[in-house]
Amino acid sequence: MKAVLSGHREPAGIIEKKRKHGFAQTIKKDSLLYFLLLLPMAYMIIFKYAPIYGILMAFQDYNIFEGISGSEWVGLDVFQFIFQQKSFYRALINTLALNFLDLVAGFPAPILLAVLLNELRYARFKKITQTILYLPHFLSWIIIGGMVYLMFSSAGIANSVLTGLGFGHIEFLSQKTNWLIMYVLIGVWQSAGWGTIIYLAAITGINKELYEASDMDGCSRLRKIWHITLPGIKPTIIILLILQIGRMLSIGFDRPFVMGNSLVSEYSDVISTFVYRVGIGSGDFSQATAVGLFQSVVGLVFLVAANCIAKKIGEQGIW
């Protein structure tokens, strides 16, 4: 600063030396924090970036005994073979359809729950309710699948109760339309409570003076929700919606595999089960890798498109 005021500028070499010295001091000062950062960095490098090398299998006639370096290079032949299979297109359409249903039914659910929980005035009841809503998230889909089968199978508890009350027998898990409804509802039940955490955190960041001013103006609870709470969490909703759209082609393996069966395979066969069938079941790792690469590329396109649309309509995107 003194050099600038006096009209003299320090040589570039001295400025660069000072910058490096300042960086070294910062590293030394916060050395423990940088040391703690090594573990997540190592995790990302080993489990996220190093496996990218395996993408080469999508362009090879991969032989597990020859390895990636010894397998024959076939270019885009694997993709051409995949795109000629009707089972792939069925899995692709089912993946998009099930994810779309999850988006329509499952995305608004945590928003609604968060708003309702925020309106509760009894703190103890609010905490108990939150805990009950969070619990399904910690259950694996294997456990949930067993519970669903016990409750809604042909000889399950639900049909026993319906029969006892004189109602008809309902095939919850073996009739295609009923299976779709059960698939979506069970997914909402499992994930909605956990999703409220982000929205409740966003609600706590809203300026409390806005609620106080609305009380003075005599606004009802519904008007405060519509004009203060929802606009306050709108940026969070937009960001999570963009991320959800970016995952439209990605679907977990556990849920459709556990809840699906041979009677509804026309709807339950998705990309993850297709990859399992051709990759693990048939041992064709080239096909499995190619499908995974296809998912990632299309998911990236969806993510970028959703972000651009959000920017075009004046909303805040994720970058």
Image (spheres, rainbow, N blue to C red):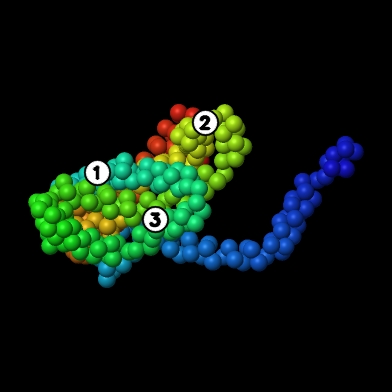
Q: Is residue 31 above or below residue 98?
A: below
- Which residue is labeled 3 in the image? 133
Q: Which mark is residue 219?
A: 2
Dot 2: element: loop
| Residue 129 position within the rendered picture, expressed as x and y whole percent measured from the top left | 42, 55
- Which residue is labeled 1 in the image? 97
In this view, the residue farthest toward the right is 6
Could you tell me the amino acid type at mark 1?
Answer: Ala
Q: In this view, does 144 lie above or below 191?
A: below
Camera-side residue: 3 or 40?
Answer: 40
Q: Which of marks 1 and 2 is nearer the N terminus?
A: 1
Task: Kindly report the distance in space between the C-alpha atoms of the residues bearing marks 3 and 2.
Answer: 29 Å
Residue at (36% x, 47% y) in the render: 247
Q: Is residue 224 visible?
A: yes
Residue at (54% x, 30% y) in the render: 218
Quarter of the figure with the N terminus = top right
Could you tell me the amino acid type at mark 3?
Answer: Leu
Local packing at callout 2 (Cα closer than 10 Å; few below 14, some 14-19, many 20+) is some
Residue at (23% x, 65% y) in the render: 146
Q: Which of marks 1 and 2 is in front?
A: 2
Camera-side residue: 238 or 248?
Answer: 238
Q: Residue 6 carries which label?
A: none
In this view, the residue farthest toward the bottom is 65
Q: Earlier in the sequence, mark 3 or mark 2?
A: 3
Dot 1: element: helix
* Quarter of image, res 103: top left
Could you tell me the amino acid type at mark 2?
Answer: Cys
In-image side of 227 versus 277 (left or right): right
Say if mark 3 contacts mark 2, CB within 8 Å.
no
| Residue 49 position within the rendered picture, expressed as x and y whole percent measured from the top left | 44, 59
Local packing at callout 3 (Cα closer than 10 Å; few below 14, some 14-19, many 20+) is some
Local packing at callout 1 (Cα closer than 10 Å; few below 14, some 14-19, many 20+) is some
